Image (cartoon, rainbow, N blue to C red):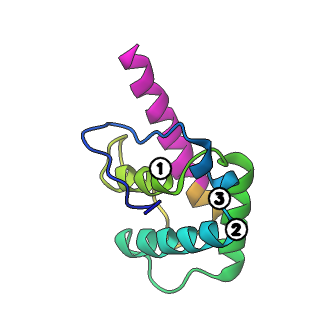
Amino acid sequence: DLVNQPFGRNEICEYRNPEIQLRNLEPDIRKAGLGFIFARIAILSGFKGEIPDINKEDITDLLLTRFQTISLNELNFAFKIDRHGYHGEPTQHYQLFNAEYVAKVLNKYLEYKDGVRQRRF
């Protein structure tokens, strides 16, 4: 449920409820949600092979330090709009699903999100 909430016609996915932010989720729920999202992203982005556990741990650490206020749903949305080219060319992953790739996608998403907010106000 925390991953597949609808976006409707919104250009951005934004939730103000702090209970669904990554930092506030129960560890088991967060781990399951991130595992689902990582697998989904890997398949939809054309990754070959498994994501090594060490990369999963590093990505989780990145998310809980630099991107802790986003939700699982927003994380999923960020990768969706990257794949769909909402903010230019999709981010190249070079068959490496790692923290560097995730940070690039999320930084592009946050810039895009800020731009949408500025246009609204």
The Cα atoms of the two marked residues, 1 and 2, are separated by 18 Å
**Which quarter shows the C terminus?**
top left
Residue 15: where, in percent of width, then height? Answer: 49, 40
Q: Which residue is mark 2?
A: 27
Q: Between tags 1 and 2, which lies in front?
A: 2
| Left or right: 86, with 39 as reference point | left
Q: CA distance from mark 2 to mark 3?
A: 6 Å
Q: Amino acid at mark 1?
A: Glu
Q: Which residue is mark 3?
A: 25
Residue position for label 1: 74
* Residue nearest the viewer, comparing 115 with 29: 29
Q: Residue at x 57, y 47 (%)?
A: 70
Compared with 11, 1 (above or below) is: below
Q: Nearer the viewer, mark 1 or mark 3?
A: 3
Q: What's drawn in magenta, residue-wise? A: 103-121
Q: Position of residue 54 (x, y in %)?
A: 72, 78
Hey, what amino acid is under mark 3?
Answer: Leu
Which residue occupies 57% across, 58% down? 102
Q: Earlier in the sequence, mark 1 or mark 2?
A: 2
Q: Main secondary structure of the magenta part?
A: helix
